[in-house]
Amino acid sequence: MSSRTVIRGGLVITASDEIHADVLIEDGRIAALAASGTAAAEAWTAERTIDATGKYVIPGGVDAHTHMELPFGGTFASDTFETGTRAAAWGGTTTIVDFAVQSVGHSLREGLDAWHAKAEGNCAIDYGFHMIVSDVNQETLKEMDLLVEEGVTSFKQFMAYPGVFYSDDGQILRAMQRSAENGGLIMMHAENGIAIDVLVEQALARGETDPRYHGEVRKALLEAEATHRAIKLAQVAGAPLYVVHVSAMEAVAELARARDEGLNVFGETCPQYLFLSTDNLAEPDFEGSKYVCSTPLRPKEHQAHLWKGLRTNDLQVVSTDHCPFCFVGQKELGRGDFSKIPNGLPGVENRMDLLHQAVVDGHISRRRWIEIACATPARMFGMYPKKGTIAPGADADVVIYDPQAEQLVSAETHHMNVDYSAYEGKRLTGRVETVLSRGELVITEREYTGHAGHGTYTPRSTCQYLN
């Protein structure tokens, strides 16, 4: 049975165009666009018509950096694939790329299989995987080739977290050399973890145990140094590089310099670095622990540099690094020792709305909003034009967005499985109204009408930006 939906009267916004158009959806894909009110559009018939008058019609968001059910610091991220993808849909995101984890002493395949088992049948929206490489050896390097062939085309390494995820420069270089050959993309957590561990030890010895010291020991200069080092290693290997969760102006400067030299170097930032700061980490009564993530929040003056980087394309993507831990019972593990606070913030539900607020505030244009939240992440990770745009042949991942609606962000009303909001009490203009995933209604006029298991695994091609 063929199924057809028409979305009428909205302003269709993609990374490249804004056009008052009707959208025809057939069998889960975009079939056609036609200017509203024209004979072509009026001739369409469908079982379902959605009135988008006065609304935006935008591609579903692509969040290329989430951590559902991630084991960390003796506990687990509080969102499952079921709760996390449902919350993503509420926030207008229709595809996530999560991180499968290789444990030291185990194969990439074991890690990937474990994450497939967590996600399969549980997701409300489509999903893909990156692979965290924690143990570089000859077998791992061979496995990287096999994973690229089957659609896991990006590999994350850590210059931070010695003894957990950490890779030394030699391991990083080997993985980058392999990526240069197999077309994979290395994603780097760029912080000098060896030096940070020294500063952590010294701070705790001085009795500096509060959450704010998490930000003070993870210095911006150590993010910049690691970013510089990762760029140079990638240059030696002849490999592309994607630096995740860039938070510091000094790190943005390293990326800008590399890009000016014509290198295939890319940068991602996250809403927390654009909207929050060390002021939050310093909140009294251990409230600052809610804002502990790595890279850490920076002083407010860094924000202007991140916005500028997004406007000049020295930063290309805004992802969430969604990795929620409840305040009660999880963040509290670090009372009396900031180094034991699980690192991560909830945000998968807030990203599209926060970035629309940035449009309202004049930081970015509407098309840039769609570019950094939908189109570029889809291209960066080999899913475009299936994901990230509204065009004939694309998956019908479509959001009807009300740009006038006002909302108050709160843990009382969000759908993430976590007991606080990082943006509690923030007033935003703009809100998701209806969400379709492959033509199926997941959110219908602010009601959840999706179900676990609708979301399917999406194999990816290689990065679409490489020279």
Image (spheres, rainbow, N blue to C red):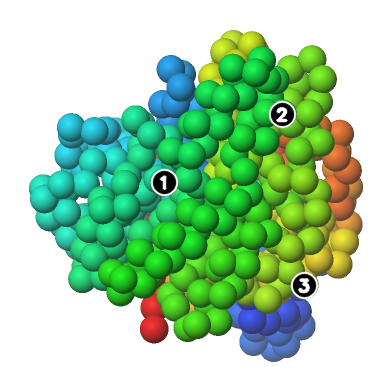
Question: Mark 1, residues whose alpha carbon is within 10 Å: few (<14), some, or many (≥20)?
Answer: many
Which numbered mark, 3 or 2, is in the foreground of this view? 2
Looking at the rendered structure, the kind of residue marked 3 is Ser
The spot of residue 273 in percent (x, y) is 69, 49
Q: Which mark is residue 212?
A: 2
Label 3 secondary element:
loop
Residue 307 image-quadrant placement: bottom right
Q: Are marks 1 and 3 in contact (CB under 8 Å)?
A: no
* Residue 407 makes an appearance in the image: yes
Q: Are marks 3 and 2 in contact (CB under 8 Å)?
A: no
The residue singled out by tag 1 in the image is 159
From the viewer's perspective, tell me whether residue 385 is left or right of residue 311. left
Label 1 secondary element:
loop
* Residue 433 makes an appearance in the image: no
The spot of residue 339 in percent (x, y) is 55, 23
The residue singled out by tag 3 in the image is 365
